[in-house]
Amino acid sequence: MDVTANLAEIQQNIRQACENGNRSPEEITLIGVTKYVTIERTEETINAGVKNLGENRLEGFQEKYEHFKDKAKWHFIGTLQSRKVKDVIDKLEAIHSLDRLSLAKEINKRANKRIDCFVQVNVSGEGSKHGLEPGGVLSFIKEMAAYENIHVVGLMTMAPHSDNETYLRDIFKKLASLRDAVKQEKLAHAPCEFLSMGMSNDYEIAIEEGATHIRVGSKLVGEVRE
Ligand SMILES: *Cc1c(COP(=O)(O)O)cnc(C)c1O
């Protein structure tokens, strides 16, 4: 399938999920995850109208950034080694994987401007070892006040791959209520309005539960590996 056809289907599903969840499609940012695909397929994605792209590895990001520069807004969605921060940080629209103090310190030191960050949370406790424990999120975010270049705009999670809708819904509900708790603190450095959750397998459920940023790879661009 070409990206345009996939995108049309995804947009239809987004509209439906918004209707189900009493939300407006304008609240949703679709991040096209191009980590699986070539420059050509990425170009097709941009031309189809997807302006926000996600990469999870430094090399993939750098290759595509060099090619497309500001033709897209770049979201870093994977583990970022602290010593690589200086190479990427000022090129990003947002980083979705802030999960440790050492990374925050490095971002703060290397960035030339305030960086929009999502704090990654390991809600499920399964699968990926990345992300903070839910219980540690609020105190971590409060600590971020010491770093003037860190702007905590939201929380991010990756749900395990599962067909169990109740289970997935529960994970997204937990992240949403954690976001509400942080937002309630009204921290100047951490408005924490956004929820980056939902991938190809579960983005409709995530939207019903409040996602503002969905990260869709395989269902949008396919999985043609480079
Ligand atoms: C790969 C990846 C995605 C997209 O996954 P799909 O299932 O292909 O949609 C989303 N978020 C993160 C953090 C990823 O690494």
Image: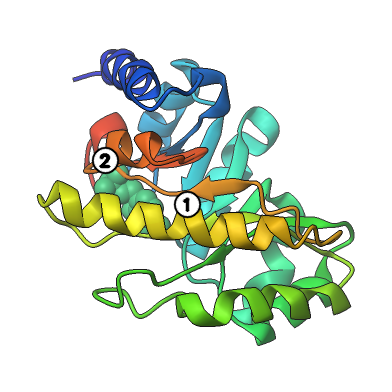
Asked if 83 appears above or below 188 in the picture, the reply is below
Work out whether mark 2 precedes mark 1 in sequence or the reverse, and give the earlier one: 1
Judge by depth and name the residue closer to the eye, 13 or 57: 13
Helix, strand, or loop for circle 1? strand
For residue 189, side relative to residue 119 (left or right): right
Asked if 141 appears above or below 160 in the picture, the reply is below
The picture places residue 178, in percent across and down from the top left corner, at 53, 62
- Give the amino acid type for the residue marked by disc 2 in the picture: Ser
What is the tally of numbered marks visible in this picture? 2
The picture places residue 80, in percent across and down from the top left corner, at 55, 72
Which residue is most to the bottom? Answer: 102
The answer, for residue 83, to whether it is visible in the render is no
Asked if 14 appears above or below 144 in the picture, the reply is above
Judge by depth and name the residue closer to the eye, 52 or 26: 26
The picture places residue 138, in percent across and down from the top left corner, at 63, 74
Give the image quarter of residue 67.
Answer: top right
The answer, for residue 169, to whether it is visible in the render is yes
Q: Is mark 2 within 8 Å of ligand 1?
A: yes
Label pair 2/1, CB-CB below 8 angstroms: no
Residue at the image point whose x is 48% and y is 23% from the top: 23
- Give the amino acid type for the residue marked by disc 1 in the picture: Glu
Q: Residues within 10 Å of mark 1 (few under 14, many from 20)?
A: many
Residue at the image point whose x is 60% and y is 35% from the top: 68
Q: In the rendered image, which residue does mark 1 sit on?
A: 55
Q: In the rendered image, which residue does mark 2 sit on?
A: 200
Q: Residues within 10 Å of mark 2 (few under 14, many from 20)?
A: some
How far apart in space, not on screen, are marks 2 and 1 (Cα)? 15 Å
Give the image quarter of residue 190.
Answer: bottom right
Helix, strand, or loop for circle 2? loop
- The nearer-to-camera label among 2 and 1 is 2
The picture places residue 54, in percent across and down from the top left corner, at 49, 46
Residue at the image point whose x is 66% and y is 79% from the top: 140
